[in-house]
Image: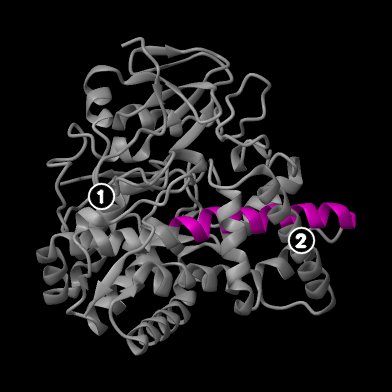
Amino acid sequence: MTDIQDYPFAAPAALEPPEEWAELRARCPVARVRLASGDEALLLTRYDDVKELLSDPRFTHHLVAEDAASITANESGGVFASGDGASVRGDAHREWRKLIGRAFTAKRVSALQPGIEATARRLVDEMVERGAPADLAAALGFPLPVWVICELLGVPDSDRDRFAYWSDTLLSLTRYTQEEIDAAQAEFAAYLRDHVAAKRATPGDDLISELITLVGALDGRVTEEVVLMTAKGLLVAGHETTANMIGKMVAMLLADRSRWERIVADPSLVRTAVEECLRHDANFGFGIPRYISEDVEIGGTTLAKGSTVVCSLSAANRDESAFEDAAGMDLTRSPNPHLIFGAGPYACLGQSLARTELQTVLKVLVERLPTLALAVPAADLRRREGLLVGGLERVPVTW
Amino acid sequence: MNITVDAGKCCGAGQCVLLAPDVFDQNEDDGIVVLLDATPPEALRAAVREAADVCPAAAITVEERP
């Protein structure tokens, strides 16, 4: 196949995968695609290929080389082109990476769990008070992860609506104009500068206060840059992805209500059900890019130096050679070595947190609202378009 | 069963700690894996195998010994 297809692919119904995934896995595992920017890239769709490339420490997602493809339709190229992480180097970067690693250990995350559960219960109670039908994405999916990030950063959750908007603009492929993105980024930066100043004056038990201590030896400008980068990273990686996943998870489980009933009957399935929803998600979004800084062979094909490669995690997660009945959902699947959090040395640092949030939401919902059902046919669910992270516009539910 | 971990590969995802907290822990300083029990009792082995299978960095090796 030598013709170039536009990427991301147009997909059928909101919970269904694009047909191209299965075709490419079978016939064209290294496919040429055209991105929203007009630039060309190579797309990987097989499980083994995606896992192998992501596990190779030589290649990263920093698309800062001159010949790297631009991902987005706007000029700044979006989050992958911003050089985040490159602005802190050497020892400072190692210290920074350790701090973030320390913040997201399974134990630290487990300590956050009671607060996450209390917030989830409060949000579900508020949704029930307002009455059915409700949009679960707006009532629970988006506010909960914002609460968690604000908790980590020490930001009052009265500011969560602004955080949600900034997050959307940072992840824009085509949804916002360059002016809107620039304005939002400037507001976000100004907000964080004030926040850092406040934390410097009155430190708290949060990541920002720890970061300030950590980089205290460096000059003020560097501190600000590091804090901005960290907060941006947390928003992008921790908020939008989890927020969308909550809505998609509930939609997937309710689309065939026997799935939901099975978990209501046996809540011990929550953990494996969450993993299967993560694997089965057809709307993860763009995928993970890699800049190929030296020739490498993947699945028998040489990827040339200078190429930009997009790893489709969701296509890999539907690979029949890696998962039995990959197109179906098995709520007891174990082990479930899906790739939704990436793989290798740059795998998602916040995956314990994401898992804890998703498991807590599902546990609270099956306990509190066992009669939960979609208020519209699953075929009527609509994707959020034009963002790097995929999700559903609304998840209308009754109970 | 004999477990070895490769701290150099570990990416600090914490899956192993969530699955088998009596066998795996994470260093408080950087989130890197700490092996608590290289030869866990039978009751923990299924969780250990799962942790090895799903480790995103393939940093856990499990040797099944008779």
Q: Is residue A19 visible?
A: yes
Tag on residue A214?
A: 2
Write down the residue under mark 1.
A15
Depicted A246 relative to depicted A51: above or below: below
Magenta span has A227?
yes
| Displayed quadrant of residue A152 | bottom right
Kind of residue sitting beneath label 1: Leu
Q: Position of residue A142 (x, y in %)?
A: 46, 67
Residues A291 and A397: in front is A397
Which of the image's four quarters has the N terminus of chain A? top left
* Magenta part of the chain: A219-241
- Towards the viewer: A78 or A384: A384
Residue lying furthest bottom in this view? A129
Q: Is residue A241 left or right of residue A93?
A: left
Q: Mark 2 belongs to which subunit? A: A
| Left or right: residue A7 compared with residue A270 | right
Tell me the residue at 27%/36% (across/down): A18
Report the amino acid beneath label 2. Leu
Q: Point out residue B40 in the picture as x, y percentages from the top left corner.
A: 28, 60
Q: In the drawing, does residue A270 fall left or right of residue A76?
A: left
Mark 2 and mark 1 lie on one chain; the one further toward the N terminus is: 1
**In the current view of this chain or complex, which residue is farthest to the right?**
A219
User: Residue A394: image x %, image y %?
Assistant: 36, 63
Gap between marks 2 and 1 measured at Cα: 44 Å
**What residue do we see at 40% from left, 16% from top?**
A4
Q: Is residue A218 visible?
A: no
Considering the whole magenta stretch, tell me its main secondary structure: helix
